[in-house]
Amino acid sequence: MFILDSSSPVPLYTQLYHQIREQILSGKLPAESRLPSVRNMASELSASRNTVDGAYQELYAEGYIYSRPRSGYFVSALDQEVAPQATSGKPGRNDYLPGPPSCFAYDFHPARLHPESFPAELWRKCFIDGLRRNSQQLVQYGDPQGDWGLRCSIQGYLERSRGVTCDPDQIIVCTGLQQSLEIVAQLLKGSHSVVAVENPGYHLPRSVFQNHGYTIFPVPVGQGGMDLNQLKDGNSTIAYVTPSHQLPLGYVMPVAHRLALIEWAESGGRFIIEDDYDSELRYHGKPIPSLQGLRPSGNIIYSGTFSKILSPALRLSYMVLPYSLLATYRQLYRAYFPSVSLLEQRAMANFMEQGHWERHIRRMRMIYKKTHDILLRAVDTHFGTRAVVVGQGAGLHVVLMLPDTRQSEAEIIDRARQRGIWLYPFSDFHMTGQPEAATLLLGFGGMKSCEIEQGIAILSQLC
């Protein structure tokens, strides 16, 4: 029995084709079975003859059925061992697709942004203005390094706010840190093979460089950042660091350590990748100047992003290459096309040129400082001396150490899920080893004040 749904967006002949095919593959319609005539099937289904004929023709073309003169259509004999497997459910259903993400009442993800933070109206105006003013350039490819106007705006901003000294010619507009690291991995492949990473540290650099055949050398992190003694004892020639706000512990690398790291790079033709991922979000004192600004002519690759302040969905970031790598970059990527939409680049350039970017930074810094302080007060109220907070004062997360709890991280995360709390595993940042005490990562960027208070109160009961 076949059933056609006239309200479905799938054409009726396709529905019938799938149902007959399903019965042939499952054996419900055995080989040499005769199908009803087109007229009889159409009458049985209350459908047009064209619908039935269309389904039969598709099955005939694919070899599922064959015709005998003046006798009609018959099911072909198939080798069931090699025939496609029958699928259950609606045509086109893919049981391997992931379901929708779970919804939690309290989401402490460390990279969430405030749900109402994106300046949609301002962005729309900048986008439309870029479309209106640059319509003639939309019929051609742009510069692979990125729009010149945007690179000039980025250069001015980095010089004013981060102390980065560079020319627009050194800037490459990318679709996030991942692409930046992919480019660096290609540029340094051959002459370099071992990358030092912070441990604990961000997992993405480890994955990217491993996928390009590099050996990963984990270096412990202390309050001064990456342990330089262990770095020097290893054989790495590339060091990936987050010196202005170490991810995930939040430590700031002091200037003496920065200079020593620069000396390590310059003394042996080595390279430093400085990831300045959330430098704008410092809530006490002035922002920490960049490592690159201490030695603009050194082998320092600087990486920044618009994701932590504006939107991770835009996939807009930038990278400053030292002049020593520019010739290699242009040789390797001379035949490549731009990876970021010109319209979005022009919109971002307008957004920066009109002063919206720096005003937006100031606004978001005030919003996140408020939620940051609410989180700290809630932890103090509900955990008291049971918890030690690490990494406060910047960014979108803090680290909570629980030296006296007997529960493991996995147990706490599982119990939290049952109460509607989502926690990002701190253990994911470790390449080797584990923290001595149970450690939680608490992001606050995407939560309302009342949610933070309530979530911390519940979490304190679980630990």
Image (cartoon, rainbow, N blue to C red):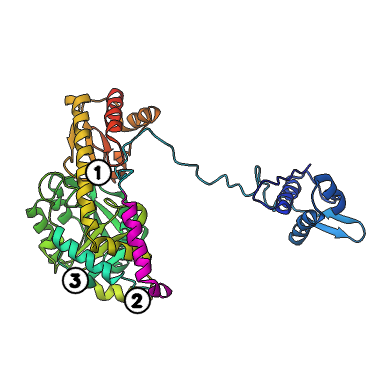
Above or below, 378 against 176 in this view is above
Q: Secondary structure at mark 2?
A: loop
The residue sitting at 20% across, 69% down in the picture is 322
Q: Name the dominant secondary structure of the magenta segment.
A: helix
Q: Secondary structure at mark 3?
A: loop
Residue 366, visible in the rendered structure: yes
Picture coordinates of residue 98, whole percent (x, y) = 50, 44
Q: Identify residue for label 1.
A: 396
From this viewpoint, which residue is outermost toward the left?
256
Residue 134 located within the stretch drawn in magenta = yes
The residue sitting at 25% across, 68% down in the picture is 151
Residue 162, visible in the rendered structure: no
Q: Nearer the viewer, mark 1 or mark 2?
A: 1
Tags 1 and 2 touching, CB below 8 Å: no
Picture coordinates of residue 176, whole percent (x, y) = 32, 58
State how far apart marks 3 and 2 are (Cα): 19 Å
Q: Secondary structure at mark 1?
A: loop
Q: Amino acid at mark 3?
A: Asp
The residue sitting at 16% across, 51% down in the picture is 244
Picture coordinates of residue 401, whole percent (x, y) = 21, 33
The residue sitting at 23% across, 42% down in the picture is 368
Q: Identify residue for label 3.
A: 167
Q: Which residues are magenta?
A: 118-140
Q: Amino acid at mark 2?
A: Arg
Picture coordinates of residue 3, whole percent (x, y) = 75, 43
